[in-house]
Amino acid sequence: MSPPEPIPIRSPAPSLGRVEGERRAMTQYERIDSAISTFVTAIEEGASPRLVHFGRPLPAHTDLQALDAALKRGPRESTPDAPVLPNLFPVAGAGWLAEPALSGYHDNGDGLICWTSSTMRRSSQEIHVALRDERTGLAADLLWRLDPKTGVLASSVRLTNLADSDFHLHSLCSLSLPVPNWASEVLAFSGDWSREMQAHRMPLPPGEWSSTNRTGRTGFAGASFALLESGAGDQAGRVLAIHLAWSGNHRLSTATCSGGARQASAGVHLAPGEVVLRPGGAFLSPTVYACVSQTGLNGVSDAFHPFVRSSILPVRRDGSRKVHFNSWEAAYFSFDESSMRRLADQAAGLGAERFILDDGWFLGRRDDTSSLGDWRVDPSRFPSGLDAFIRHVKSLGMDFGLWVEPEMVSPDSDLYRAHPDWCVHAPGLARRTMRGQLWLDMARSDVRDHVFSQIDALLSEYDIACLKWDCNRFLDPAVSGGQQAAERITRGSYELMDRLRSAHPGVDIESCASGGARIDLEVVKRCMRVWTSDTTDAIERLAIQRWTSIIFPMEALGAHVGPSPNPITGRVIPMEMRARVALFGHMGVEADPERMSETDRKTLAEHIVFYKRHRGLLHSGRHLRWSTRDGAEGRMTISEDQGEALVLACRADVAVHAESAPFAIPGLDRAARYKVSLPTPWPQIAARRLAEPHLWRDGRVFYADSLVETGLALPLSDPQTAWLIHLIRL
Ligand code: DGJ
């Protein structure tokens, strides 16, 4: 076979120009700093940039060259004579044999990428590296930004094809970096419907660990993983957390090369043929966000929560998060106008502030087999019109939200009958439904225009404060116009959301995908909250909220009080536990109050009052999670100044010993004393074992140091026990 022809380049690679302070030495170093970390890169002419340091803040006078010199290795047997160093953008043509950060090929088959020039410059909090390969005509622009306050690193790559022929992009990592020396374990996630974010912690394996998502949504396992030092836990130890902000197919991975070099990477997952860069074409990767914590997984949240609050979550006109009432688990598809009005009355009676009308309100929708795409109010459901119903909701002091599933179409719908070619389908293959539905081809602008006009009409006609935006199937096969198109379809959804948001800036969006299958930092830029899981079982939610909240602050996580027995798991759970787990999130209710006992309704209403009183703290403070040595769970939100805290002390299963271990409370101001109270109602069985209950009626004063070190001997050995602890510094 003859060697491939060189690729003609259309125009010279764009020059970055020189900026003030730019140095061109044999090796150039740049650093960006934050309150909790420093990120240092090095670059040699014509090579990929290297990572010198990502971790503890370095003193300003640190000699970066000396730091780098300490990491240099000499030659060894059976390796290239010019050593290939682990770096921040490894490519195969430059001698890297593990997973490359970029791969693909030109029309002539040439896929060997070898940078011929590289430039690095820093401005304020950003480092920009421009890599050019004159031979293949590829330009990669790498960008890292370190948030100065929180230490969250944002990393993305733009790839441009400057050659005269097409470049078939196979893979492009948004972040690829050497695994820190201290890391020995990976924390990864799996998930399924109502079982989101199942955590798995394992030693970093030899060879590769990878998690590839091909569902066309973020997926039930989210898009995060972490590398930990041995022994790191909730409150201590070093952790590198990595999150890919992308609501579609992706790949997260680690690789340990035979020589011992270790690399972690995250990026969009592309199917063969999915992205072809025409001459002059460019591809911008999704962004990866990462941080290094010295204080365990809670330290990761200490970085991510304020970052997400200040830089990701949409700014909302109405500051506090209203208590939602969602009709789904209360009514499913069985409702009419009068039962829905009754439900709204009940919801208002409990103290709800926003009523969300879930699935079933539109033309002909009686179950999940029809009507998606026909976003017109069904007059047989609402004979007086939706407007009248909304007026009723508003007269009760609530605003109104509506469920939609904009990307979907039912084969049994007017939309499908009019435009059978608008769904995602592979020519010649059967159209396989899931939940009786097909995915609309959001890569097509005419399809997006149509969906926009439908939802826009609803938002213009009715007084709607919030859309619950659902997405209930996999994107498979992800084909548009005969080509693989998952990535374009994902971007199409963003475009649709952006357009609707700019046309209706006051409307909140809740991201839902069969529960929590679309929770990532790209969609959350457009959504004020996510539906964390379809399971409202408080025991399941404890774990799901725990792991989702590593990255996402509590106020973004929809958490509802559901029915008991729970419709998904069958568990019977006391109301105070259901309400308390929902308190640590964006609280709502999703159960028929008429089917609750009088006592449960009262308990729920009391917790809603409590939520309203404390949501300012719950949605702005520092959130900590921990487990006791005997399996009880702690959740706490504490104000920035440590002046006030709210703690959930609870247990899912029976403790091994009848006397549970004293419940220690971390994160307090150790030098202070706190007034500690136990908000009522107390868990019934446990309350009987509380020492000196009369002394607890008005709260008691304790030294923080003893609470942190020794803890409170709260009765906490029975299953499904949940105490609230409120602390005010004196
Ligand atoms: C799936 C969602 O996760 C549920 O909350 C509910 O909205 C149903 N879809 C409605 O079909």
Image (spheres, helix red, strand yellow):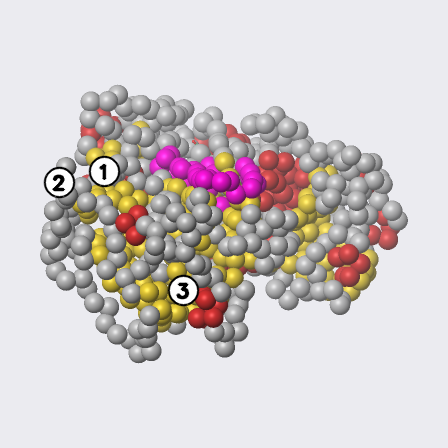
Q: Report the amino acid beneath label 1.
A: Gly
Residue 694 in picture, x, y percent from top left: 87, 50
Asked whether the beta carbons under mark 3 and mark 1 sit within 8 Å of each other, the answer is no
Q: Point out residue 619 in the picture as x, y percentages from the top left corner.
A: 56, 56
Is 405 in front, or is 471? 471
Q: Foreground: 330 or 438?
A: 438
Depth-wise, is mark 3 or mark 1 nearer the camera?
Answer: 3
- Up the image or down, 475 lies above or below 453; here it is above
Q: The disc labelled 3 sits on which kind of residue?
A: Thr
Q: Which mark is residue 41?
A: 3
User: Which span is picked out in magenta?
Assistant: 198-225
Image quarter of the C terminus? bottom right
Q: Is residue 647 left or right of residue 548?
A: right
Front-most of residues 195 and 108: 108
- Residue at the (56%, 40%) spot, across then down: 202
Determine if residue 313 is in view: no
Residue, x 30% and y 48% (percent of image)?
Answer: 92
The quadrant of the picture showing ligand 1 is top left
Q: Which residue is mark 1?
A: 273
Asked whether residue 234 is drawn in magenta, I would say: no
Mark 3 residue's CB less than 8 Å from ligand 1? no
Residue drawn at x 50%, y 52% as measured from the top left: 241
Asked if labels 2 and 1 touch by Cβ distance under 8 angstroms, the answer is no
- Using the numbered discs, state the Cα–Cα distance from disc 1 to disc 2 in whole angstroms: 24 Å
- Queried on whether the Cβ of the residue with tag 1 lies below 8 angstroms from ligand 1, the answer reads no
* Residue annotated with mark 2: 2
